[in-house]
Image (cartoon, coloured by chain):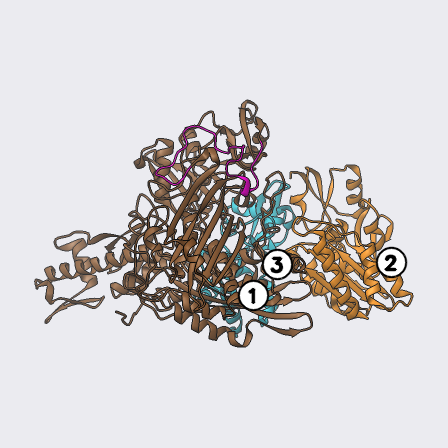
Chain colours: A cyan, B orange, C brown
């Protein structure tokens, strides 16, 4: 079936199977920044923004995003670059497999709640697993990044 | 899981007649549990165009559309006003926001999942479920009766309450299913709920009756609840520890809301 | 010894962090060729069965199926998937496909088709006739069990490792220094106890992934998310009968390894499918396969007897261990030996030490390499026992550790006797700041205020626990790395290394070392790593070897490059080599000067043109251990025994931290991974031997909500044999949390939990049993 939606500012038409998940559609169509970690809505590596909201693309049928706006990290390149500098300062990046999804979630948090407390940051990012860093450094980086925003 | 056709229903009538026409036709909720389901789906019915995504304040109750996401529910100021915000707090503890942006209240309720935090906390209140075409049934009844409803769940009505309330989800990590969840509220009457037993949440009516008829002894109420509760083993937790947790948290809950 | 560093030991952002956060797609599956055949694996539903026959005729008829591999049509050569050097210390007990299935999930056939859907559909049509056999699911009953898991012919050990498959033994080991029984008789205090640890999952976020294609020379090119590309090439060559020169292995960006990617996963299948069909192929494990069909940590039972005299000196340690290697013997012996060799030397005042036991086969998921292997299991047991001993002696557990643990310039006889799979190497601790680490950590956690416990509210108590640890830095004389540096026009350097960046940041660390030695900046150093065609050899990322071995390699190469540049500049300027000074940008000799950029341009385009390049290698003669003291504070519910981490303090001696933030990341990442093993990572099999905890919704790794305050400090230390004074730091972080938590639980409730993970339910049971 045909699904029309807006991907990173461009209107696109994907030809998909009725039971196809957005993660698979995106990767098949060359959007490889979206990662498959668990395929069970439990790790967050596949997070994209649908109409601005963090959404697990492994668990959303592509058919259901007809007419919606989907954002991947490609649409927030500058912001991801800035955030990565905070990650670097805190030693919060390692393998990077969770990084692009984290950038999107941080972007959504900033839109929803520009000055979150540390607890609010942890709550908002809790669905994004990271096995490498020990997690505290990532929280520090996000806290400083958002705190440093005008 | 294979889906043969994806149908965006234009009316409840259409959705309902599709659902009734074959057991292989399914209603799509948030879609999060779809993957875990067994068997292929012939027609998957999308309700997103039917205006079921609203939270509205009515005179006696709050109307929550079946397609309202857990995240919209949790952040709604209307929902936060009920029972001191316990509904928001409980739903906030489910997985991460990205999960809750997809998971729907209707899907959580309809499926009667044993691990549901939504059902446990809703059972702490008077709640009616509205099914298309014409059934209205209380949540208390719905969880008790076997099987699933024939109609399409369109609305969850939560009757306004300023009850004192307690909710606890016992879990290993933030992304865990509950090992046990407990919700106790007290408005005029007590409501005592234990979920993730591991079966679906249970309303401890014996203990409620004792307290609601003037019983004062919390230990006695806990004892009554423990007698009527059927707790069991799950993959990760044995019944013995689950019972211990139920006992401890029922007591703490009753002391907090009394 | 120590000098003012400009690049190393300074905060330097990882060189790839920005690109990865921006979504640059360089992980293995991102690079799979379009239209690759998709390989899915048919796996055994039985824990133990003989495969009588496989009928693929119906499956082959499914349109879109390109190739089906079974035991009937693949090479039958025994090998080990462990991904080690040669000859391997693991038994060659695995065939690509075999007549037996040895765990639920063991590979029975591979189907390659034009889509995943078709591959799965075809898989359903494969008919396998199984003779179901009685599985061995209790590792304590595996030795000499009547069910023999490896009855097949042809399997063998490469050198004596105690391999005796007819007894279900993958390996065994015994050693003794002094006479433990005699020394124990002289002790005033003896404690004895047994500890069980579980089959922890690596749970790296990127699943096991590989793909293959033929290049324009019809050579096989395999992309794999591996820690050991060179070992992979060798093992493929030997097993498939394909010459090494016909194989290229490329390691793209790796999304976390932790030892799990040292071994083989889908590579043999991809290689065979592509060789046979001449088409590109790919194999991506599902998360369920990553958990249930790859490798786990070796579950162990460790029984310890420790004796001390009244003066507080530990005189003897007797350590018996039993390790469950599961269906295959990857790392069976090496993991086992580490239990002794990287834990017991911590207490080097002993007069006698005994260590030994069996590594048995069972019908569980195979165990393999895993960050901190052997050490974490041993540390849980030994460091719990030290607390038990301290209590029996009425001594502060920190004091007992201070009295008995390793100090600088000391040694342990164990180093010489036990290595990793072979004999060890004697060494003196040239750097050991463990006493400082203990003292500093004690202050940071405020031990004297908090030990053993404090009530902090109604049914809330806080307690503290501590443990110390050591690791190694590569395997002496075996682990080797090499590095080529060439000068580009413009004056930048192209560095190719075999060293394998698996997310830990080794590319950044190597760039820093090269930049430091060549007095330049990291942006002038371009790193390309881990491609068997293009980079020189490296053993790979394991055994905490990268900073020490690959770092030394890069340091050697950079200093050789420096010499070479000075020589070239002297020739160009027509002066004596000894008169030339080089500051990273300019060569000067008296009045004459020459820029690096001009030298590079000249040598590439103008005069006596040639490529200025050097290649150097390194292997260690010692394996200097990093040391750590760790202290945890936890808050417990005294009725439900639920708990949370409040604070975890570590002070680490890893020599110079080449990249302080990455080193901190290694320590903290290790701690939380170890804390997962200690607290939440329950592994559950059903009674048929099927692993049930196979996704993140049921296997619980710590999330942001479970992590308390991490206080991570490093001791001021300099290891003379390390690059700019560095030792390793990749594994040591993981070692302490099980013992720290176990000791804190004891300090809170007076019960010791002998099984990992230490769940509230296990504490509840222990408290109940005491009553």
Residue C68 visible: yes
Q: Residue furthest bottom?
A: C449
Residue matched to label 1: C744
Give residue C7's quadrant in the image: bottom left
Q: Spatial distance from mark 2 to mark 3, Cα to Cα?
A: 32 Å
Discs 2 and 3 share one subunit: yes
Q: Where is residue B173 in the image (x, y as percent from the top left)?
A: 61, 58
Specify whether residue C672 is painted magenta.
no
Left or right of B16: which side holds C163?
Answer: left
For residue C62, above or below residue B81: above
Discs 1 and 3 share one subunit: no
What residue is shown at x 32% (from left), y 44% (from top)?
Answer: C532
Q: Quadrant of the C terminus of chain C?
A: bottom right
Q: Residue furthest right?
A: B213
Q: What's the chain of the residue with tag 3?
A: B
Circles 1 and 3 in contact, beta carbons < 8 Å: no
Q: What stretch is highlighted in magenta?
A: C134-163
Discs 1 and 2 share one subunit: no
Q: Nearer the viewer, mark 1 or mark 2?
A: 1
Closer to the camera in the image, A18 or C651: C651
Which of the numbered marks, if any, corresponds to residue B173? 3
* Mark 3, secondary structure of its residue: loop
What residue is shown at x 49% (from left), y 64% (from top)?
Answer: A79
Answer with mark 2 or mark 3, whichever residue precedes in sequence. Answer: 3
Q: Where is residue A119 in the image (x, y as percent from the top left)?
A: 60, 69
Give residue C604's quadrant in the image: bottom left
């Amino acid at each position: 079936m045909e699904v029309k939606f807006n991907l990173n500012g461009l209107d696109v038409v994907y030809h998909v199977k009725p039971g196809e998940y957005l993660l698979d559609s995106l990767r098949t169509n060359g959007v490889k920044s979206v990662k498959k970690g668990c395929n069970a809505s439990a790790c967050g590596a596949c997070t994209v923004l649908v109409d601005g909201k963090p959404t697990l693309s492994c668990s959303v049928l592509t058919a259901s995003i007809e007419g919606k706006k989907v954002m991947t990290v490609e649409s927030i390149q500058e912001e991801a670059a800035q955030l990565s500098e905070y990650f670097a300062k805190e030693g919060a990046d390692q393998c990077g497999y969770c990084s692009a999804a984290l950038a999107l979630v941080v972007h959504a948090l900033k839109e929803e709640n520009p000055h979150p407390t540390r607890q609010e940051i942890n709550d908002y990012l809790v669905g994004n697993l990271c096995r490498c860093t020990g997690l505290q450094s990532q929280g520090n980086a996000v806290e400083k990044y958002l705190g440093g925003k005008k | 899981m294979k889906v043969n056709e994806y149908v965006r229903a234009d009316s409840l009538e259409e959705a309902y007649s599709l659902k009734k026409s074959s057991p292989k036709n399914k209603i799509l909720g948030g879609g999060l549990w779809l993957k875990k389901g067994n068997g292929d789906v012939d027609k998957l019915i999308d309700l997103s165009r039917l205006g079921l995504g609203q939270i509205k304040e009515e005179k006696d109750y709050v109307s929550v559309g079946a397609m309202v996401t857990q995240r919209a529910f949790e952040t709604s100021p209307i929902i936060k006003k009920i029972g001191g915000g316990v509904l928001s707090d409980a739903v906030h503890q489910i997985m991460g926001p990205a999960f809750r942006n997809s998971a729907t209240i209707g899907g959580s309720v309809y499926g009667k999942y044993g691990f549901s935090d939504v059902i446990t906390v809703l059972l702490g209140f008077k709640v009616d479920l509205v099914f298309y075409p014409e059934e209205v049934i209380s949540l208390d009844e719905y969880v008790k009766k076997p099987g699933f409803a024939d109609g399409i769940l369109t609305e969850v009505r939560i009757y306004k309450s300023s009850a004192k309330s307690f909710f606890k989800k016992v879990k290993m990590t933030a992304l865990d299913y509950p090992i046990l969840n407990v919700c106790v509220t007290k408005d005029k009457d007590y409501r005592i709920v234990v979920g993730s037993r591991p079966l679906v949440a249970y309303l401890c009516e014996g203990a409620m009756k004792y307290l609601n008829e003037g019983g004062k002894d919390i230990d006695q109420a806990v004892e009554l609840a423990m007698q009527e509760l059927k707790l069991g083993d799950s993959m990760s937790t044995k019944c013995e520890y689950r019972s211990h947790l139920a006992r401890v948290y029922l007591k703490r809950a009753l002391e907090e809301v009394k | 010894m120590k000098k003012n560093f400009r690049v190393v030991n300074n905060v330097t952002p990882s060189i790839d962090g920005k690109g990865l956060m921006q979504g640059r797609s360089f992980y293995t599956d991102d690079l799979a060729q379009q239209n690759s055949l998709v390989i899915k694996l048919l796996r055994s539903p039985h824990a133990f069965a003989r495969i009588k026959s496989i009928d693929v005729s119906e499956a082959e008829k499914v349109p879109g199926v390109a190739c089906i591999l079974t035991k009937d049509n693949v090479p039958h050569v025994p090998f080990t998937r462990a991904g080690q050097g040669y000859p391997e210390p693991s038994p060659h007990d695995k065939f690509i496909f075999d007549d037996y299935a040895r765990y639920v999930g063991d590979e029975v056939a591979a189907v390659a088709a034009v889509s995943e859907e078709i591959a799965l559909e075809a898989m359903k049509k494969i008919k396998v006739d199984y003779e179901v056999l009685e599985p061995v699911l209790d590792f304590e009953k595996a030795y000499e069990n009547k069910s023999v898991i490896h009855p097949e012919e042809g399997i063998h050990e490469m050198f004596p490792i105690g391999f005796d498959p007819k007894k279900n033994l993958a390996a065994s080991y015994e050693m003794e220094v002094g006479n433990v029984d005699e020394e124990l008789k002289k002790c005033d205090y003896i404690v004895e106890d047994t500890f069980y640890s579980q089959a922890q999952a690596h749970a790296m976020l990127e699943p096991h992934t590989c793909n293959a294609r033929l290049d324009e020379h019809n050579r096989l090119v395999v992309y794999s998310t591996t820690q050991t590309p060179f070992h992979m090439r060798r093992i493929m060559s030997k097993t498939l009968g394909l010459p090494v020169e016909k194989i290229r292995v490329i390691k793209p960006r790796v999304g976390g390894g932790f030892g799990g990617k040292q071994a083989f996963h889908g590579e043999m299948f991809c290689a065979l499918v592509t060789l046979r069909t001449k088409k590109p192929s790919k194999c991506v494990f599902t998360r369920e396969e990553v958990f249930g069909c790859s490798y786990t940590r070796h579950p162990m039972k460790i029984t310890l007897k420790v004796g001390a005299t009244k003066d507080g000196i530990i005189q003897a340690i007797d350590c018996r261990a039993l390790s469950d290697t599961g269906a295959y013997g990857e790392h069976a012996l090496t993991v086992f030996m580490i239990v002794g060799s990287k834990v017991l030397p911590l207490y080097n005042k002993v007069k006698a030490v005994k260590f030994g036991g069996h590594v048995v086969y069972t019908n569980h998921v195979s165990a393999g390499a895993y960050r901190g292997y052997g050490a974490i299991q041993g540390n849980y047991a030994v460091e719990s026992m030290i607390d038990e001993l301290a209590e029996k002696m009425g001594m502060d557990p920190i004091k007992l550790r201070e009295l008995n643990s390793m100090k600088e310039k000391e040694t342990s006889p164990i180093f010489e006797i036990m290595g990793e799979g072979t004999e060890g190497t004697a060494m003196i601790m040239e750097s050991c700041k463990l006493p400082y680490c203990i003292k500093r950590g004690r202050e940071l956690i405020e031990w004297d205020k908090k030990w053993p416990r404090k009530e902090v509210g109604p049914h809330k108590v806080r307690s503290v626990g501590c443990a110390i640890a050591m690791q190694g830095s590569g395997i002496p004389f075996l682990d080797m790395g090499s590095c080529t540096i060439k000068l580009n026009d413009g004056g930048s350097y192209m560095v190719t290394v075999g060293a394998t960046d698996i997310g830990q940041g080794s590319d950044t660390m190597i760039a820093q070392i090269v930049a430091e030695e060549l007095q330049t900046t990291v942006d002038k150093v371009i790193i390309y790593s881990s491609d068997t065609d293009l980079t020189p050899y490296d053993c790979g990322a394991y055994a905490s070897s990268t900073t020490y071995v690959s770092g030394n390699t890069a340091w050697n190469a950079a200093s050789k490059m420096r010499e070479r540049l000075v020589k070239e500049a002297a020739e160009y300027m027509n002066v004596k080599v000894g008169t030339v000074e080089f500051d990273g940008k300019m060569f000067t000799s008296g009045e004459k000067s020459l820029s690096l950029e001009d030298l590079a341009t000249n040598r590439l385009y103008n005069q006596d043109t040639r490529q200025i390049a050097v290649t150097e290698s390194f292997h260690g003669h010692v394996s200097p251990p990093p040391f750590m003291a760790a202290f945890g504070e936890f808050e417990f519910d005294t009725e439900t025994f639920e708990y949370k981490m409040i604070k975890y303090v570590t002070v680490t001696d890893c020599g110079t931290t080449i990249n302080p933030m990455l080193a901190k990341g290694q320590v903290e990442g290790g701690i939380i991974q170890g804390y997962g093993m200690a607290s939440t990572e329950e592994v559950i099999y059903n009674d048929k031997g099927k692993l049930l905890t196979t996704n993140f919704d049921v296997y619980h790794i710590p999330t942001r909500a479970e992590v308390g305050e991490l206080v991570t400090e490093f001791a001021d230390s300099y290891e003379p044999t390390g690059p700019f004074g560095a030792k390793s730091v990749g594994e040591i972080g993981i070692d302490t949390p099980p013992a720290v938590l176990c000791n804190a639980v004891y300090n809170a409730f007076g019960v010791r939990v002998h099984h990992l993970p230490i769940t509230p339910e296990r504490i509840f049971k222990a408290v109940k049993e005491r009553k």
